[in-house]
Amino acid sequence: MRRPIIAGNWKLNTCSESGPALVAALKAEVPAPSDKVEVVVCPPYPYLGLVAAAAAGSGVEVGGQNAWHETSGAFTGEVACEMLQDVGCKWVVLGHSERRQINGESDELINSKVRKALDVGLKVILCVGELLEDREGDRTEAVLKTQMTGGLVDVSAEQMAEVVIAYEPVWAIGTGKVASDEQAEEAHKFLRGWLEGRFNGDVAGATRILYGGSVKPDNANGLLGQPNVDGALVGGASLKAELFIPIIQAGVASVS
Ligand code: PEP
């Protein structure tokens, strides 16, 4: 069984008060690590330590929204994977579409970050997903293939135990336009098949593939109930406990 992951990407939101308060509310739902669901929150860098302290001992784990692929040096504004670990992160999100689009991150750069994160022992949520024009031009699978191939260069089958894929169709992120259950399942199935070809059946069978893009309490059960959907990466709805908790519950229900 693939244990579902419900991950919250807080993006450029929360503050030193609201971040820990949000975690305190989530702890009521997952007071201790659970074998039914893994819950991850990804606050902005300045609040990572505070949020990690608030989450300590509970079923809420903490991740960075990005990282740099060098340990130290003249990289103004960047944060190293080791620094994320130092303040209590177990996870890092890499290749988010906002970083690909706004910051121009290439698959090559993302791959450097993936390899660095894995080298230091951080678990990676690698985001992939097509633009609306790609979907309309029937290029979804070609785009996913390019991003998976590029993002996972020189990553071994063993290392894949620490990698989670997040399928996030860009047209569904923050737009309220969610992929249908069938569209999500089709893309996830394609990704699992790609993992089998690139690695092997064991890796394909064990790798968790999350759906991301306007996941809300009212669509979570349908999406998470798909056989190849192993959880969700949630933006907007992760900022309110009353929205995020029902999505966590949908994750638990998807394997019960
Ligand atoms: C995201 O930021 O990864 C995301 C899926 O955002 P939203 O849930 O707001 O669409």
Image (cartoon, rainbow, N blue to C red):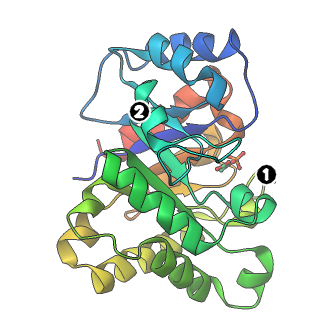
> Does any portion of residue 24 appear in the rendered image?
yes
Q: Position of residue 212 (x, y in %)?
A: 60, 54
Which residue is drawn at the image coordinates 46% and 43% (left, top)? 81
Numbered tag placed on residue 176 in the rendering: 1
Relative height, residue 171 to residue 70 (above, below):
below
Task: Kindly state the secondary structure of the residue where label 1 is placed.
Answer: loop
Instruction: Classify 211 as above or below 56.
Output: below
Residue 85 numbered tag: 2
Q: How many marks?
A: 2
Instruction: Find residue 54 and report its horizontal and vertical position in percent.
Output: 48, 11
- Pointer 1 local density, CA inside 10 Å: few below 14, some 14–19, many at least 20: few
Q: Quadrant of the image for the C terminus?
A: top left
Image location (x, y in percent) of residue 209: 42, 60
Residue 92, percent from left and from top: 48, 45
Disc 1 within 8 angstroms of ligand 1 (CB): yes
Which mark lies nearer to you, 2 or 1? 2
Does ligand 1 reach within 8 Å of label 2's beta carbon? no
Residue 62: mark: none
- The residue located at (69%, 8%) in the rendering is 17
32 sits left or right of 11 in the view? left
- Quadrant assignment, res 116: bottom left
Name the image quarter holding residue 164: bottom left
Distance from the alpha carbon under mark 2 to that under mark 1? 33 Å
For residue 165, say whether it is visible.
Answer: no
- Amino acid carrying label 2: it is Gln
Report which quarter residue 56 is drawn in.
Answer: top left
Element class at badge 2: helix
Q: Nearer the viewer, residue 165 or 253?
A: 165
| Side of 126 where 199 appears, left or right | left
Mark 2 or mark 1, which has the lower sequence index?
A: 2
In this image, 29 relative to 207: left or right? right
The amino acid type found where label 1 is placed reads: Gly
